[in-house]
Amino acid sequence: MVEWALVGVLTSALVIWLSLTAATARPDNMIYDAWMRMRAGPTSEQIVIVAIDNRSLEALGRWPWPRQIHADLIDRLAQVQAKAVGYDVLFVEPSASGDADLARAIRSAGNVYLPMLVDPVGENGAPWQATEPIPELRAAAAGLGHVNLVVDDDGVVRRMPLFLSASQSSWPHLAAQLTRTVNPRPGVVASDQAQSVAHLTGKGAVLVSYRGPPGQFRTVSFVDLLRGETPSAFLTGKLVLVGMTGDGQGDRYATPTTGEGQLMPGVEIQASLVDTLLHHDAVTPTPLLWVALLSLIPLWLLMGGLLLLRPLWSLIAGAGLAVTLLAISATAFRLGVWFPPLAAMAGLALAYPLWSWRRLAAASAYMQVEVDAFARSGAAPRAVTTLAGGDVVARQVETLRTAVSDLRDMERFISDALHSLPDATLVVSETGAVVMANAQAQVLFGRGELTGAPLAPLLKAIGGLGSEGQGAEESIEPVEIATPTGRRVFVSSAPLVDANGVAQGRIVRLADMTEFRLAERQREQALQLLSHDMRAPQVSILTLLSGAHDRADPAFERRIADNARLTLTLAEGYVQLARAESQILGDAVFDLSQVLLDAADTMWPQASQRGVRIEADADADGGEYLVRGDQGLITRVLMNLIDNAIKFSPADSVVNCSVVAGENAGQAVWVCTVRDHGEGMSAETLHRLFEPFSKGETDRPGAGLGLAFARTVIERHGGDIRCETRPGEGAAFIIRLPQAIETA
């Protein structure tokens, strides 16, 4: 920022200096002339030039002519009733004859204005000198006016002072005198107040609006008018300027609208000034202070662009501002205001390369530092020597290019390594946003794109709380959470620091512990099964066999058979539970009501033996109750529930089985209920009812694995199972499974 501000200040100082001085005057004048040529238009029909042209010189003889000829022309102009006459011919010395006739003609016309010369350097060291017509003509004239021109340094006449003054004298311009006869405007014409300074001073300078190249004004030849060959209507009521246009007379000047090698007669320049004053369309120059201030605006717009935009767009912005400056200058000129654009354009032309040089120097220095750092660290030795030719910057760029290529390869290696990890892994920034994630993490969170997502909501969406009630996303120590799908995830993290040891974020690992926890639970269950549940009936068998029992007694055989049967039931129940937890589920669509009826039919013999009736029904709408999953496992679950209901139902009671449509958390489900009318159970028993090896308060034989098996199967199908019971009112086991739509 300091360098940027310094560049801005330096270029601003340059722009102000150029605006307040004439340093850019020549190129600005060239633009001014171009705009003037574009602004050219028709001249006023009120102005007529009587030209002392080549044909008149040939017809009337060598110049200067006798003053009688001038007197005759003035008489002719009086006859045609010209509005006013500006006679742009100097009569500063008396003639041998004709002065009286010329004075009479001027006095008789009453509207003839004569020119005078005002030199900035007088004779004998005088600061100025005014040369007026001879006294006779001066007294006869309607007024005098100076015909001084201001020639710029490039020799072009662009402006003329409306009056000159020195000491106690003041002289209006001849064009201003003529204009006052049509449109008196003392403020525009000339002030009669004298200057207190002794040297000659021009005031009221006007930038003349030229209408085009020479020959734009209505012109008649001196000799034609003198001979009466010009119609009177052509001159009646007009402002007439009489002046020299013939070749070799020296009264010719370059103007903004003259072409290469072309000059405009002085009388046409005077006519252009008259035309400008009549139309009130003199070009107004912008004050220098405003030029400086306005020229700073595009400069600082570019400086802002250099700070915010890319180099290409900064270049486009600079070129666009330069074109805009020219367009604004041209538009203002058409509206009569001259705004020189070169100072502002020079600021633009300097600011861009100066800032680019500073940026290039800074970039080169930075690249050199990085190259040296690479060389010292030995991280990229091939990058330092890759490019032997080219300039310093080219070598530095090539070195960094190779180093960046190596870094990209390293980044790709890290990314591939991250994605190949077996566990879900996230790279998290200091702000808690995910920077990188592997495919396992996308599967875990169920989202295709994790980059940019905050970590805390992700963990809250899938997890519970740590052991101390602290959220996994807030825990510093590793914590295990349970996902809504029943999976167990171990969350741990490690700090991520940069080369300087500054913390940049964390690497978060989410290890799926589900299979491990399942194996651990199965191991505990197997140990419990082997060490307690299966050991007890085996010990009983050994005790019976080793004791002094009558082996012919039927009760002896029955006891051994009951214990062996219990052992077999425990083993089968454990195997079924293990399969339910680990085997791949089927993916078929089946009718849940039909499965319920099949299970009821299968358990009918056991029910009949105990004197219990099974009633199975569904909604009466005649539709199907489609479920997607493993039909065999669901059938076994329903058989277990019906079997339990039969065991705990008194004789002559009913086991009710039903399937109805329902809703769970906005999802359409099938609700399957198996209800008995037994003794029910306590709240304590209900709390641990679905745990493995839990047999409740009954002493009936069994493994206590049937309900654990049922819960495992139902939850793996995306459903849930619960029990509603009260002591003495029986129990109802309610299963909810998502409805499925069969597709072709």
Image (spheres, rainbow, N blue to C red):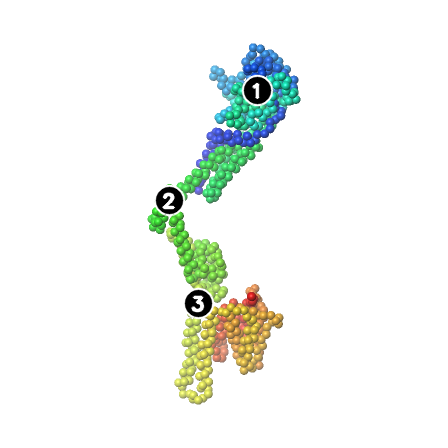
Quadrant in which the C terminus is drawn: bottom right
Q: Toward the viewer: 249 or 493?
A: 249
Q: Position of residue 236 (x, y in %)?
A: 65, 21
Say what secondary structure mark 3 lies in: helix
Question: For the residues marked 3 and 1, what is the alpha-carbon distance in whole angstroms?
Answer: 116 Å
What residue is shown with label 2? 395
In the rendered view, does 739 fall on the left or right side of 499? Answer: right
Say what secondary structure mark 2 lies in: helix
Q: Is residue 744 above or below residue 63?
A: below
Q: Earlier in the sequence, mark 3 or mark 1?
A: 1
Q: Amino acid at mark 1?
A: Asp
Q: Amino acid at mark 2?
A: Arg
Q: Position of residue 217 (x, y in %)?
A: 59, 25
Tag 1: Cα neighbours inside 10 Å, few (<14), some, or many (≥20)?
Answer: some
* Mark in the foreground, 3 or 2: 2
Question: For the residues marked 3 and 2, what is the alpha-carbon distance in whole angstroms?
Answer: 56 Å
Is residue 184 something that shows in the picture? Answer: no
Question: For the residues marked 2 and 1, what is the alpha-carbon distance in whole angstroms?
Answer: 73 Å
Say what secondary structure mark 1 lies in: loop
Quadrant in which the N terminus is drawn: top left
What residue is shown with label 1? 53
> Which mark, by number, is residue 515?
3
Kindly indicate the quadrant of the structure image that contains residue 427: bottom left
> What residue sits 38% from the left and 49% below the top?
403
